[in-house]
């Protein structure tokens, strides 16, 4: 694509620059790639120098030029005369998103893109909506925390919502692979950093809003404002599936042009019939404006009722057939790291791996497990380093209140001292008489939990879920709660046979 043609997408006041009057020779430059990473520059790239929290893209502009960048776009002029055309804009992130959408020929306009946001439940809901589209005969991509699914290929997800050029490239690949839909998780970071600007969403979904990412957003109003942007971006005809049981839901109903609500505890457009819970799954009728949907799912617990209602609300509002909705919901066996039962029928204890890494998510996990447990509930968890510190004692308090035994360990300590994190968690346990242990090594903590468990106990391994690594210092080490738990269970079985 020619640079002049590409820059027409930036003809908006908020970009803060008039780039239309370009030299003819500059406008005729061939752009082969849009990138914000100087290491990914190839000959003919347009390098967008973004200012990040830790590094400034301007510091890498010369490296990008040396690697073959045809032009640089930044929020500041170069310190010295540049060897290539240098374009200055007010908002580099918005410019990057709009350029990427134009470069990849606006693939979101050729897909039914469902944007799903909120604190908890995004991943499971995305998987459910994906399953419904597939059951309806619509090939569906998937973008989120666990995986990027393009056609029949699953790729490891580097972040919940990719940066704009990576996102637009994958959406274009989906179109090229015959996909007609893509449910995707839209994180608050992505919304505030404008990664999804320039996209067309066919529907938006709001799950809930609880304490999370306050180290980045600062406070709950700012966190909510980031989430709200998704619903401000929706076209007038696009449905917005909104959870009315969440206090923020009513505020979003005033923002969205076409709100379609769901709830368990109050009147809404979509509500469930009588609920019964078991370790085998969920079975209920969902009342919708189009009639009753029979929901049968292998997903477990009350939080998954909300996820299922969100999927039903979205898919009925998009006029997908009831037969496809029911078939899709039933077909999903589970989601990696979301209430994932890793023990087997040959084990005398139950071990569950879950991504719960906030106090609200941990409370939901424990409240789901408690009535289903035949024995004690043993909770193994830690908190991530260099993230919101305020949730650490809150998670400790929740674990102590709803568990019989708590084992505090490491999550991803990153650059923090693991013991310092653990001490902050322990402040929440102080008023409680619940038994607790401190085992900083996570593998040893999992092993200890399995050793201490009595027959019929339930062990919850919370915080890491689907992750297959542990970040300690500046190293990312291979670590998988599922694999570690399965090994510990195998040792328990072997010991039992010997005994």
Image: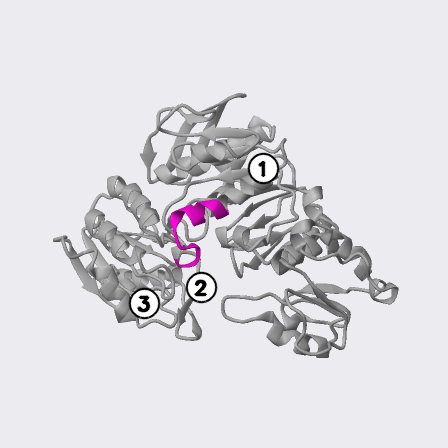
**Which secondary structure type mostly characterizes the magenta part of the structure?**
helix
Q: Residue furthest right?
A: 24
Give the label on residue 18, or none. none
Near mark 1 (Cα within 10 A), the count class, few <14, some 14-19 or many ≥20, is many
Residue at image location 43% in from the left, 32% down from the top: 250
Q: Earlier in the sequence, mark 3 or mark 2?
A: 3
Q: Which residue is mark 3?
A: 443
Quarter of the image where one finds residue 37: bottom right
Q: Which residue is mark 2?
A: 468
Residue at image location 66% in from the left, 58% down from the top: 96
Q: Which residue is mark 1?
A: 203
Q: Position of residue 385 (x, y in %)?
A: 36, 66
The magenta segment: 215-226
Q: Position of residue 138 (x, y in %)?
A: 65, 39
Q: Between marks 3 and 2, how big is the CA–CA gap? A: 13 Å
Nearest-to-viewer mark from 3 and 1 = 1
The question of residue 225 being in magenta is answered with yes
Residue at image location 52% in from the left, 59% down from the top: 159
């Amino acid at each position: 694509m020619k640079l002049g043609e590409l820059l027409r997408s930036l003809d908006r006041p908020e970009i803060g620059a008039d780039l239309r009057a370009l030299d003819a020779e500059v406008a005729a430059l061939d752009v082969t790639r849009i990138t914000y990473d100087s290491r990914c520059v190839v000959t003919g790239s347009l390098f967008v120098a973004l200012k990040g929290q830790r590094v400034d893209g301007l510091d890498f502009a010369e490296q990008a030029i040396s690697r073959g960048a045809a032009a640089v776009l930044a929020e500041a002029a170069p310190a010295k005369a540049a060897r290539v055309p240098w374009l200055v804009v007010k908002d580099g992130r918005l410019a990057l998103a709009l350029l990427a959408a134009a470069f990849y020929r606006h693939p979101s306009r050729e897909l039914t893109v469902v944007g799903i946001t909120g604190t908890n439940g995004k991943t499971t809901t995305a998987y459910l909506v994906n399953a419904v589209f597939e059951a309806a005969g619509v090939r569906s991509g998937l973008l989120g925390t666990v995986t990027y699914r393009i056609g029949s290929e699953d790729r490891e997800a580097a972040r919940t919502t990719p940066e704009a050029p990576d996102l637009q490239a994958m959406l274009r690949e989906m179109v090229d692979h015959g996909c007609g839909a893509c449910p995707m998780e839209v994180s608050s970071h992505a919304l505030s950093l404008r990664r999804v600007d320039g996209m067309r969403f066919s529907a938006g979904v709001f799950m809930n809003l609880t304490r999370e990412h306050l180290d980045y957003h600062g406070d709950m109003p700012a966190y909510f404002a980031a989430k709200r942007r998704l619903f401000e971006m929706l076209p007038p005809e696009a449905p917005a599936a909104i959870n009315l049981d969440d206090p923020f839901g009513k505020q979003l109903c005033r923002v969205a042009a076409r709100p379609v609500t769901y709830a368990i505890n109050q009147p809404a457009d979509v509500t469930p019939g009588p609920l019964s819970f078991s370790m085998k799954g969920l079975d209920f009728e969902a009342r919708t404006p189009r009639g009753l949907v029979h929901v049968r799912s292998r997903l477990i617990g009350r939080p998954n009722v909300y996820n299922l209602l969100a999927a039903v609300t979205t898919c009925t509002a998009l006029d997908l057939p009831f037969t496809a909705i029911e078939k899709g919901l039933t077909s999903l066996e589970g989601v990696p790291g979301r209430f994932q039962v890793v023990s087997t029928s040959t084990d005398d204890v139950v071990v569950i791996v879950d991504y719960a890494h906030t106090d609200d998510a941990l409370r939901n996990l424990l409240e789901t497990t408690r009535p289903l447990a035949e024995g004690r509930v043993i909770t193994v968890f830690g908190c991530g380093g260099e993230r919101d510190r305020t949730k650490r004692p809150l998670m400790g308090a929740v674990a102590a209140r709803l568990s019989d035994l708590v084992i505090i360990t490491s999550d991803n300590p990153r650059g923090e001292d693991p013991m310092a994190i653990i001490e902050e968690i322990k402040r929440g346990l102080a008023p409680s008489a619940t038994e607790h242990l401190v085992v900083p090594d996570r593998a040893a903590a999992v092993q200890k939990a399995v050793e201490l468990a009595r027959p019929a106990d339930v062990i919850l391994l919370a915080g890491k879920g689907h992750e297959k690594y542990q970040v300690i210092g500046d190293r990312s080490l291979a670590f998988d709660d599922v694999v570690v738990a399965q090994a510990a269970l195998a040792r328990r079985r072997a010991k039992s046979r010997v005994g």
